[in-house]
Amino acid sequence: MFLETIEEEQAAGRVAEIYDKQKAQLGFVMEAAKCFTARPDLLPIYTDFSDSIRAGFSLGVREWRLITLIAAKHIPSTYCSHVYGKQLIADLGSKEAVLAVQRDFRTAGLSDRDVEMLAYAETIAQDASRISQVDIDRLRGVGFSDRQICDIALCAAFRCFVSRFFDAMGAGTETAFIDDDAEFRTTMSVGRSP
């Protein structure tokens, strides 16, 4: 980490509560959480905002992870690619399926609906000013509601913000998210070395 942040033993109040919850879930506190304590008031704000976005997300966890993986690839964020790539193994059934999506989701055997969703997320991560009514019509054409389209955009744009912040703060990928498989590790390393 480039800046001073709150370590576990220094945490108090809401920061301590958030750290304790994350440690109970993962066994450790992620550097992604610690980043927001360079300004201690930010972690509770970020946590509440992130939890609210996820609680109201109109698509599934699998879709959240797919959108995040594709956005992270184009940011580029090694941290988020490793975290979400690892989580997607169970969602997609194998490391090979995740690798295929990471390399080119258009040829990875996904449904037309998934491909349109990820094409939209990819454009948002690369240059959202290129989005036009044609993109929205394509999403509607494969069955997405306007709320779902909003949520795809929100998920991809949210990832752009937080991933860039993590890199700017110097957050490193925790070893728990770095796969033992060299090919998987190399493919997920899209930006800064883990």
Image (tube, rainbow, N blue to C red):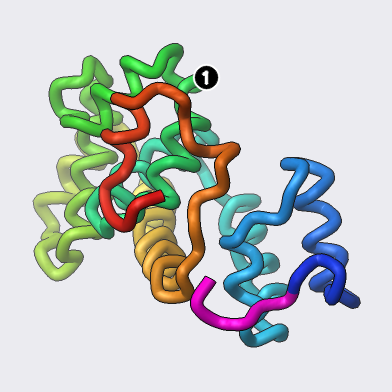
**Vertical order, 86 against 89 (above or below):** below
Q: Which residue is mark 1?
A: 90
Position in image of residue 127 (x %, y %): 15, 65
Q: Residue at x 43, y 41 (%)?
A: 82
Q: Amino acid at mark 1?
A: Ala
Magenta residue check for 5: yes
Residue 142 in sight from this viewpoint: no
Q: Is residue 133 magenta?
A: no
Q: Which residues are magenta?
A: 1-6
Of residues 41 and 132, the one nearer the viewer is: 41
Give the image location of residue 10, x and y in percent: 84, 76
* Count of numbered badges drawn on the protein: 1
The residue nearer to you, when weighing 55 against 73, is 73
Left or right side of 170 for 3? right
Q: Secondary structure at mark 1?
A: helix
Q: Residue, x 32% and y 15% (percent of image)?
A: 96
